[in-house]
Image: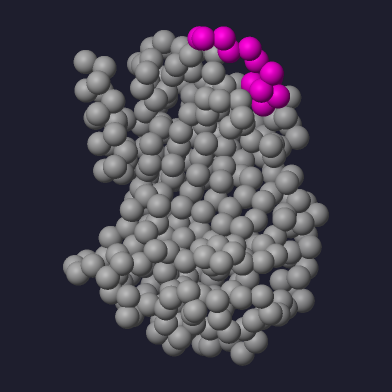
Amino acid sequence: SGRDARVNPWSGGSSTAVGGPAGADLLEGSWLNISRPNYVECLGQNAENDFMYTLGRMSFDIFQPSNLICSVQSTHNTIRMIGEREELPDCVPNSLKKEVALLCNSSYGDSASKRPFLRSYDIAVSMTIEPPSLVGQPTPATTPSPTKRMRAVMSVKGYILPDPEVKNRLTVWFTGGSLGPAKLSSNDGDETDDEEGNISAEGNDYGGLDEWNSIFGKGKWRRALSERARGMAAKVLLGVDAPSKMEEDGQLGYSLNRPVGGHGKAYIDVLYLDDDLLIMKGHHGTIYAMARSMVSQRYRNLQAASRT
């Protein structure tokens, strides 16, 4: 694309950089994924033509029960510049620790160009946990299944760092995530979702916190031997601190204390970027097409107006 991800957008670089001209980071904002979800072993589509997967496949078996069926409504990627030392991640791939440590130990002074050149890369997936009978799937005998549809948001916390050797490449790693029930409101009209995964729908068709607790509450299910083996492998390889209890609001969280990644290992290449569209290619060859969300675009317009 001719764009250079290594140029700091706060350094007064040229407008051909991924970061754009000084004071305007084109990558920053919330992006709506307009591509098909790329999780493995798709189970087909529901009545609303949303693609369906198991919770285990969507979360690398971190969240249980792993055989719950989830339909995906939308995916938002939120990218922002990290500008304060206390915001730097605690968990970093081994091969990147020295590079991130240099950011942490830098003396920035008053110069904006010396801020850490690091971006957050957070993902929020708005989805529905489906009763198996509603989507033509068999009901599992060993784990509980919902009797009503349940709206949920699965989030992943990540970071991206420019690759020093490839100008349009961003090295990515993830440090944790969460799963929780989405906030519901009984507005009339079509379903909508925002950047935080809050969904408007008629509440009578969807289960609430009691339904959520009946599925995810401690002691409601037991892991199969294969699930326990995968969980142990994730703990050893990634340092996964798996969800041990559910919060009062239904949230389940995890952390990756030994995240994998590094330059040339886990990355995304920026193929195209403008005010409205972002196209990237992952290290496995998957293409991601994203449109800037309306909220982010309005914020960018206000920022541009304030500079004129």
Residue 40 visible here: no
Rendering quarter of residue 165: top right
**Is the N terminus in the top left, top right, bottom left or bottom right quadrant?**
top left
What is the x, y in percent for residue 251?
A: 55, 62
| Residue at position x 21%, y 15% in the image | 308
| Residue at position x 57%, y 9% in the image | 109
Q: Does 121 sit left or right of 92 as displayed?
A: left
What is the x, y in percent for residue 155?
A: 51, 54
Residue, far front: 248
What is the x, y in percent for residue 60?
A: 63, 60
Rendering quarter of residue 23: top left
> Does 108 appear in magenta?
yes
The residue closer to the viewer here, 235 or 279, is 235
Q: Does 209 sit left or right of 190 as displayed?
A: right
The residue closer to the viewer here, 207 or 259, is 207
Residue 197 sits above or below residue 77 on the image:
below
Q: Does 292 sit left or right of 6 as displayed?
A: left
| Residue at position x 58%, y 13% in the image | 108
Residue 217 sits above or below residue 295 on the image:
below
Q: Does 12 sit left or right of 291 as displayed?
A: right
Residues in magenta?
100-111
